[in-house]
Amino acid sequence: MSDLYANCCVDITLEELDRPFQYRIPDELRDKVKVGVMVKAPFGRGNRTISAYVMEISDKPSIDKSRIKDLSEVVENRLHTVSDMIELAAWIRHSYGGTMIQALKTVLPVKQKVEVKSIKYATLAVSREEALTYAGEFEKRKTQLLMANILRYMAENSQGSEDKSFECKKLIELSSSSASSLASLNRRGLIDIREERVFRSPILDEIKSRGQEESKVCLEANAEQEEIISKVKADFENKTPKTYLIHGVTGSGKTLTYIEIIDYYVKAGKQVIMLIPEIALTMQTLTRFYARFGERVSIINSKMSAGERYDQFIRAMRGEIDIMIGPRSALFTPFTHLGLIVVDEEHETSYKSGQVPCYNAVETAVHMGKLYGLSVILGSATPSIESYYKAMSGEYQLFSLDKRASGQALPKVYVADMRAELKEGNRTIFSRKLKELMDDRLAKGEQIMLFLNKRGYAGFISCRECGQVIKCPHCDISLTLHRNGKMICHYCGHEQDAYRICPKCGSKYITGIKAGTQKIEEALHTLYPKARILRMDKDTTKDKHGHERILSAFAKHEADILIGTQMIVKGHDFPLVTLVGALMADMSLYTSTYQASERTFQLLVQAAGRAGRDSKPGDVVIQTYSPDNYSIVASQRQDYKAFYDEEISFRSLMKYPPVEHMLTVHISSKSVEKLERACDDLKVDKDLRTSFEDLEIMGPVKQNAYKLDDEYYQTMYIKAVDRERLSDFKDALDLYGAEKGLLSYIYLTYEFD
């Protein structure tokens, strides 16, 4: 029997120990040692043993066998939260690539050197009568007057409770004393001073105030919502948790449905993670949750300080909170009694990490549900094609909320053909229909949201005369214009010269489309000099509470018009907004990705959903050069099923996800020559290709941003019916690169779809 070895992380809280330590697994422990278990292992000199966690098991020693020590024992009563997270990290590494250390740092918060906040309290160590006697004695001496002030104040203000605590900072202020006098009384044994750690609260006073007001408003679930709530409860009681997809139109009450289900789980002693896609949604979501759950709810996001984030994890481990709200990093909150994960707006691409490992938080949440026996709820008005596909196949249970909870009708959607606007002499940013409706709303004192659809802009070429977009003849994906005047497909590498004249209508108006929120703001100020305008984009939300400040001002009607990128159209509820304008829909419609139509449909429907959510009806104007495109037509009708049927037909024809799975391999190097040579090796190596003849491999091709920060980038795309085959190919690439020495000068990263 050959030896087996355990690669262990000996102290997961110390960042400097950023490498595994290898131990031999004794025969008597073979059946007990698994990835994620806690073990005792010798460390350093002498007989010292420490706790460690098994990250992976291998039959290959990493150093000379004589230097490898044996594991001492397996700890049966391990800390489940931490060891389960290591097991999850192993899955993330296998599923998304990267190293085990990178996966561990993703799921386990690294202990940082953060300032610990604390408050000091003082209590009398003698009776009130004795304190007053000492105060009288001290008052006879000038040097002891401050001590007398403290004792007299504490004695006179602790009637009925001689063990009453006084916050030291306030005590010094109220008694007109000093810290040195307080310390002197403590040394004399007349008072006791204790120090209590205070955990930072990220919840703003404004949110608490709003939450208290909202708690007075009792909303009851309607029949559609109650049916979902009852089904999830029944599955929990029967111990048959599932993954559920709630497809609800905008304003259908998905959040209230979540809250009712979460309330049930919390009362059952379970903890809950609530994922939201954007920091911009934190204020509104947290207000509603604070109204129901008070201090038992907390948040975590990238805008918080390291100390604030660390405090929330400690509070979670101590059981001081029941619900954690936040973007994808909140998924790894170290709860000990986790029972439910809710992913709101599950279609959002921000749930996919851009850093190695490039994990998908939605997929990871679903895997956690299977791994730990949790209920997982995914919700959206525009579910991702992948999630809806799984719901149609029975992998997820599908629920539908087809009507707005308020009974209000969905907004009326107009499509403005910008080709016609140009032909009829309108060269402004705003269509005539949008201008007409903006005049009307400003006159009525109602609010307007203008959404600039900039997501994923990547230099596509279109004709403003006829709307034609230049696409790859092989992939049906728009070609991307590069600075050298070439148009390139980033999937198969097809390349051609850029057109100067439209090949369809002969117009000279063929070019890329560019605009920004600042330009829109300037045009509005010129058009409506008296209007109050707010702009929300990356530039105006740089500071810590930038999102809350702008959204709060708009909610208070301190502005008439809110301009912004996609961050303003996700889940916000403003009763006075009766008009939404979606400017330049084509900027996401023809980006160089197979998901362009899906993302456009999602953004436009989500934007439309912001209008008319209260008693007043809403209108929406979509401005586009492609009014006949199926994603625009379906957006106007707000018909998800029609869009899905069209899109899944396209995906089936082209073998795009979710019909087949796809792996994107990013290959980068500081040396352009070495990068080209390595890509050639990966492309033509017979052994590598022969082992994976069932896979469709495209590329490598140059990325749009071929050079970034002195690094050169190329990309490969690999399709397969079986997702595991892509993981095998990923591992084979890593092994091939290591054996051939390629990894000494190239860097491989992976993305899965």
Image: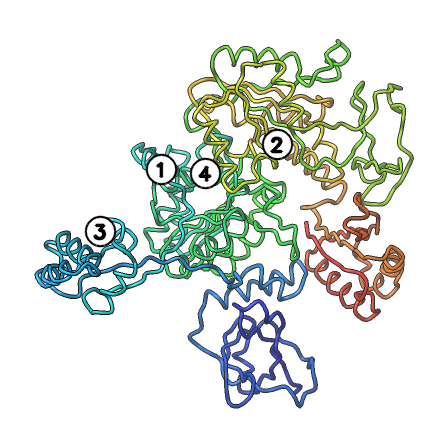
Q: Residue at x 75, y 51 (%)?
A: 719
Specify which label sits upstream in the sequence, 3 or 4. 3
> Callout 2, which amino acid?
Thr
Report the side of 288 relative to 37 (left or right).
left
Cα–Cα gap, marks 2 and 4: 18 Å
Most extreme residue toward the front is 142
Give how far across and how far down residue 333 sits, in percent: 47, 56
Would you name the residue on which mark 4 appears? 283
| Circle 3: element type | loop
Q: For mark 3, does the 10 Å Cα neighbourhood hold few (<14), some (14 to 19), or many (20 or more) residues?
A: some
Specify which label sits upstream in the sequence, 3 or 1. 3
| Circle 2: element type | loop
Cα–Cα gap, marks 3 and 2: 54 Å
**Disc 3 to disc 4: CB gap under 8 Å:** no
> Callout 1, which amino acid?
Gly
Specify which label sits upstream in the sequence, 1 or 4. 1
Q: Which mark is residue 565?
A: 2
Counting labels gives 4
Q: Residue at x 25, y 61 (%)?
A: 182
Specify which label sits upstream in the sequence, 2 or 4. 4
Q: Is residue 280 above or below residue 311?
A: above
Cα–Cα gap, marks 3 and 4: 39 Å
Would you name the residue on which mark 3 appears? 175
Which-is-in-front pick, marks 3 and 4? Answer: 3
Give how far across and how far down residue 57 sits, in percent: 62, 75
Report the side of 384 relative to 284 (left or right).
right
Cα–Cα gap, marks 1 and 4: 10 Å
Cα–Cα gap, marks 3 and 1: 36 Å
Q: Residue 103 falls in which quadrant of the image? A: bottom right
Which-is-in-front pick, marks 3 and 1? Answer: 3
Report the side of 290 relative to 396 (left or right).
left
Would you name the residue on which mark 1 appears? 211
